[in-house]
Amino acid sequence: MRDTLDCHGWCRALEGYAMLSWLAGVGLPAVVLKQRGRPEPDAYPGDQGVTEASLMVRNDGSEPSLLQAWVDGGNEQQGPADVSTPFLVVPPMMRLGPQRGQVLRILGADLSGLPQDRESLFWLNVLGLPPKAQASQGSVQLAYRTRIKLFYRPSWRAPRPRRLAGLAGRVWRGADLGSAIQALFTST
């Protein structure tokens, strides 16, 4: 089968990496990002003076991990020292022990410079570094980075579900088309 594929050596390199990973026992990172509780529909940065959000980070593994978190404007090549955004992540760096969790707080420092006529897109980055391997062992260590979209929504943006509950069944007229549009908003 290999003779029919023109892989120029990368097939053997991939096979070698897979075998090395299997022999070294490399697994996936054990740090899990998850939302803390159910999201509150009215608690978005920009709405009614809300200037922060939080995210729970948990290490479900058996080894400690070092995490670094920052927000960037979309250039994934920039590191935390090179970015300039109106958001701060607290704590920016932490050691997360095995079976431990920590809340990351994303604070809006100076939101006045953001456009108020549209949403702004930023990225929350979480870089995870495994502990240093013992010198007597042969091992492969991988650092990983997770990127999560972070939206800033100005306070005038579309109403949240609680506000939409009172709009069910209303008829609106489209300004450009002059056609009637039945609002089909429902609350759950």
Image: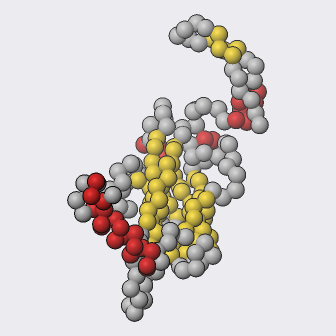
Left or right of 22 on screen, residue 40: right
Residue appearing at x 22%, y 59% in the figure = 8
Percent of width and height locating residue 38: 70, 52
Q: Is residue 72 above or below residue 168?
A: below
- The front one of 20 and 151 is 20
Q: Residue furthest top?
A: 178
Q: In the displayed image of the protein, which residue is found farthest to the bottom?
A: 136
Of residues 47 and 16, the one drawn nearer to the viewer in this rendering:
16
Quadrant that contains the N terminus = bottom left
Asked whether the viewer can see residue 78, the reply is no
Q: How is the image coloured?
A: secondary structure
Q: Residue 150 or 141: which is nearer the viewer?
A: 141
Measured along the vertical axis of the image, is residue 87 above or below residue 156? below
Q: Taking 68 as reference, is 107 above or below it?
A: above
Horizontal side of 75 relative to 163 (left or right) equals left
The image quarter containing residue 172 is: top right
Look at 41% across and 89% down and name the residue there. 137
Q: Which residue lies furthest to the left in this view?
A: 8
Residue 7, position in %: x, y? 26, 57
Q: In which quarter of the image is residue 169?
A: top right
Q: In which quarter of the image is residue 76?
A: bottom left
Q: Where is residue 29 in the image (x, y as percent from the top left)?
A: 51, 69
Number of callouts in the render? 0
Which residue is pictured at 45% across the width and 74% down the height? 22
Q: Confirm whether residue 170 shows in the render.
A: yes
Which quarter shows the C terminus?
A: top right
Q: Where is residue 34 in the image (x, y as percent from the top left)?
A: 61, 59
Left or right relative to 173: residue 114: left
**Residue shown at 71% from the left, 27% from the top:** 185
